Image (spheres, rainbow, N blue to C red):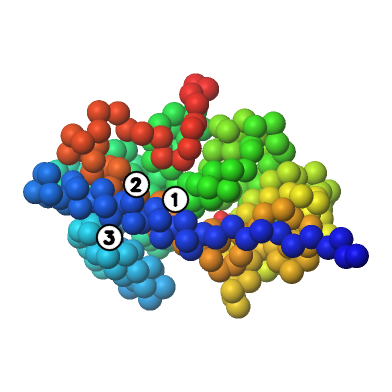
Amino acid sequence: MSTTRTAQLMDGTGLARRIIEKAAAEAAEISRSSGTGPCLATVLVGEDPASATYVRMKQARCAKAGIRSRHIALPAATTTAELVDTLSDLSGDPDVHGILLQHPCGPHIDERAAFEAIAPEKDVDGVTMRSFAAMSFALPGFVSCTPGGIMRLLKAYDVELSGKHAVVVGRSAILGKPAGMLLLAEDATVTYCHSRTADLSEAVREADVVVAAVGRPRLIRGEDIKPGAVVVDAGYNAGNVGDVDFDTARTRARLITPVPGGVGPMTIAVLLAQTVEAAAHQLGFRRHRSLTAGSRRGHA
Ligand code: NAP
């Protein structure tokens, strides 16, 4: 009798659809009651075709969910000061509820200065230092969208995190680092791995939950996955390949995200949900901002 395990797939496509449907229903309710619907402002500097495609995709998803969007396309030669002015204007505009600055903006732009011009209550992409601090203190606030999506996936599949060892591979500001902070807020014991980690295999072998956030095809070997572990692969590489060697990892894990169709669709779903949440808050439909990524407790 074969003892080979086949992990259950964590269906990000289906969960993202349900999150967007809920956001759309709430957006419709806000529009009916207030006469004005949620509005996401997207800001793009320059004409990078990939960035332009991402922005168009986000606008199209907004439109489908009944969320208005306003697009500001700035020339590549825009200075940091001009970009800061644009974002400050949007931050003060009561008709705009969420702001997304598509990045990277180009080497001549001080992106940190630009992000900080976004009002925290409109920071639906979770890029400001205030949002980052809220995540690290486990306080309410908007989360980085991909880590927020990872947490929603784990919650949807009832993955117990308290007391579990989570190993996050990657420490970028938009993905690995906040993912680890959100896992810590759920009482996981978190280890970060990165390009200087001496022995990645050894660290991964200890993990009850692995979050791969690197951008290197099949860097994480299936044979290093602890039997029964939960594997979340946020990596996306050419040829629809993740950071985890899916075929072998699947024979050891209990739950695993496919690539594509796992973490990928969750990012935009969280962006839309947080835009509606921002609008609800700003238009007086919520007295307190709800937690957007599960039951984070304050440890400040
Ligand atoms: P990034 O900014 O390039 O960061 C990559 C991280 O991986 C860094 O922390 C780096 O370490 C670490 N790393 C590189 N080589 C490594 C190695 N050999 N062993 C261990 N760690 C290593 O990338 P990112 O923006 O976080 O994105 C990571 C992946 O997620 C990409 O495939 C991207 O396409 C994907 N992604 C997906 C979504 C989505 O699904 N919607 C959203 C965002 C990103 P150092 O810090 O030491 O350099």
Q: Residue furthest toward the right?
A: 1
Task: Give the crowd class for mark 3: few <14, some 14-19, many >=20 residues within 10 Å.
Answer: many
Relative placement, left or right, of 128 versus 151 is: left
Residue 274: numbered disc: 2
Ligand 1 found in image quarter: bottom right
Q: Secondary structure at mark 1?
A: helix
- Decide which of 1, 276 is in the foreground and name it: 1
- The residue at 70%/36% (across/down) is 164
Task: Give the crowd class for mark 1: few <14, some 14-19, many >=20 residues within 10 Å.
Answer: many
Relative placement, left or right, of 191 versus 140 is: right
Q: Residue furthest toward the top?
A: 300
Name the amino acid, label 3.
Answer: Ala
Name the amino acid, label 2.
Answer: Gln
Relative placement, left or right, of 234 versus 167 is: left
Name the amino acid, label 1.
Answer: Cys
Give coordinates of residue 165: x percent, y percent: 72, 38
